[in-house]
Every structure is written in structure tokens, then in C-alpha cells.
Amino acid sequence: MSEQKIIFSNNPDELMSLDINLHGGVFVIVCESGKMQIEHEGGTNFLEQDDLIVCNPEFLVGHYMRTADFVAKAAFVTASALDDIQYACMRDVDCYWDKAKFIEQHPIIHINEEQKDLLNALAVLISAFAKKKQSRQLSRMYELLGHIASLIVFSWVDEHVLYEEQRQQAFAKRKDLLLHQFLVLLQETRGTEREVSWYASRLNITPKYLSVITLNKFGKTAMQLIQQTACQEIKRLLLETNDSIKEVSYAMNFSSSTFFSKYVHRHFGLPPHRLRRREKQ
């Protein structure tokens, strides 16, 4: 049985107290009335009526107070669902990493009635799928709806007056520029190039330095990011196409189907044909 990857509640306190692994996931909360005050090292944030917040658990848990009349709808997106949504957004959202960074630094977005109705409708659909007997197909369906909700939020970032200002400031810093260029290359290759040296040579830096700046920024080495991207693309090709294993191997730039099978088995614990069968069950 598949785990529930997107969990909803009309009580944010209840959601935060559930026996679930919060590491690597995100909270999404829409305030309907009242006020929430969040204290953290970067300062104080206030969540008020018709505000939306997207943040990691460390930002929120144990750092907030709320008024007695505070009413909100909340969701928790687990790390595994977030990885899938993030990968889909990398392919579909222009300047994805810039916008993700903007949301991290400005986690509260004020939404209008039309935007709130749209999110509520998507939440109803996702919740309906989540309550059914779980299968990989249903899990995939409500993850896709989560992806749609993410695309909507990212589209609102484009309208934020501070977004373009921040983007220009970020590009002024060399490390941020190098990271941006690396992530663009990663997005373009989709894991078909799997050596850190390939990316480092195009950025005119050493592989070691590339890994240092990715580790400092994302908590993952360059190789881990490359492997994560390659695995997501392999899974997508096996699940969403009818290409043969040999054709998928060729599309992913492996020298032979044998090397491809060994790579898949090392990262997924299954050979490609069994991975495809499992994901489609």
C-alpha cells in the first residue's frame, strides 16, 4: 500500500502533531481568519486572512503563536511527493530555482478570492484521491494535482513586484550565478550527462568546487543532484512511455543496455523491466 504523500487538515496544530516524518517536506497553510505570528532567526512573519504560506517544518514548528480566532486550512507535502513535484516543475517552470528561492525568502503570499477558490478546488480533488484505497495510479494522480497547484503558486510569483529585483541581486553573486548555470545545465540534460566533471568543465571550475557550493546551498553534492535528476528521468521514461529498455537506455545516453540495467538496479534495487512493472501496477 502506498503512503499518503499529501495530507490535509482544517487544524494546522493537529497536522503538526501527527506521527509523520516531517524531514524534507513542506507545509502549505491558507489563513481564513485571525492571525498567526511566526518568530525565527530571520525576523517575524505575520500570517493574516487570505495569506498563503509555503515553508519547511523547521521554519514553523515550535516558532509560532496564533490568535484565538485563527482558522486555517493546511496541508503537508512529504519529501517523496515534493521530489516528484519539484522535478516536474523543473521541466515546466521558467527560472524554477529563482522562484523557489524567492518563495523560501518570502514564504507568505497574499491571495485573492479567485486564487483561493482555485486552490480549494484542487485541494478537494487531491484529498478525494488520497482517501481512496491507495494504488500507484491514484498516488500519481494526486501528485499531478499537487504539481498543478505548485504551477499556480509559481505563476503568482511572476506577479510579485519584489521578484525581479531579487533575481537581479542574486545574479550579481558569483556563487549564485554558478549554481544557476549548473541547474540550467542539469535541467537541459535531464541526467543524460552523469559526470560532475562534464558540468564543471562548462562552468570553468573544478568538480570539487562545484560539489562544495551545491553542498553548502542544497545539502547535496553535485553528484547527488545529478543522480537524483537521472533517476527521476529514468522513472518517467519507464512509466510514461512505451519505449523498450534498449530505447530508454539510448535516450539516457548509456553505452549499453547492460550498463543501464546495472545503474537502475543500483539506484532502485530492481532491474528496469521490474521497475516499470512495479510503477505501472
Image: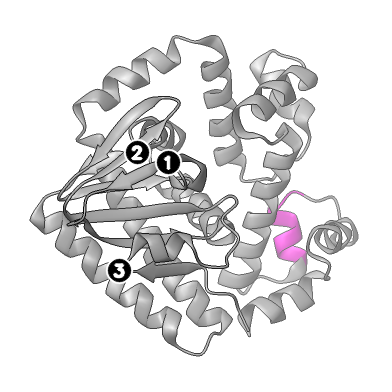
Residue holding disc 2: 38
> Secondary structure beneath disc 2?
strand
Q: Which residues are magenta?
A: 246-253
Q: Residue at x 60, y 27 (%)?
A: 217
Q: Nearer the viewer, residue 231 or 81?
A: 81
Q: Which mark is residue 10?
A: 3
Q: Is disc 2 in contact with disc 1, using a CB cutoff of under 8 Å?
A: yes
Mark 2, other Cα within 10 Å: few <14 / some 14–19 / many ≥20: some
Is 201 rendered above or below residue 1? above
- Asked if residue 228 shows in the view, the reply is yes
Residue mark closest to the camera, 3 vs 1: 1
- Camera-side residue: 207 or 134? 134
**Sequence-first tag of 2 and 1:** 2
- Residues tagged 2 and 3 counted as in contact (Cβ below 8 A): no
Q: Amino acid at mark 2?
A: Ile
Residue 41: image location, x then y, percent: 45, 26
Q: Which residue is mark 1?
A: 63
Q: Residues within 10 Å of mark 1 (few under 14, many from 20)?
A: some
First reached walking from the N terminus: tag 3 or tag 1: 3
Disc 3, SS: loop
The span from disc 3 to disc 1 (Cα, nearest Å) is 19 Å
Q: Quick check: can you spot residue 241?
A: no
The amino acid on which the numbered mark 1 sits, given as a three-letter code, is His
253 sits to left or right of 74: right
Which SS does the magenta portion mostly show?
helix
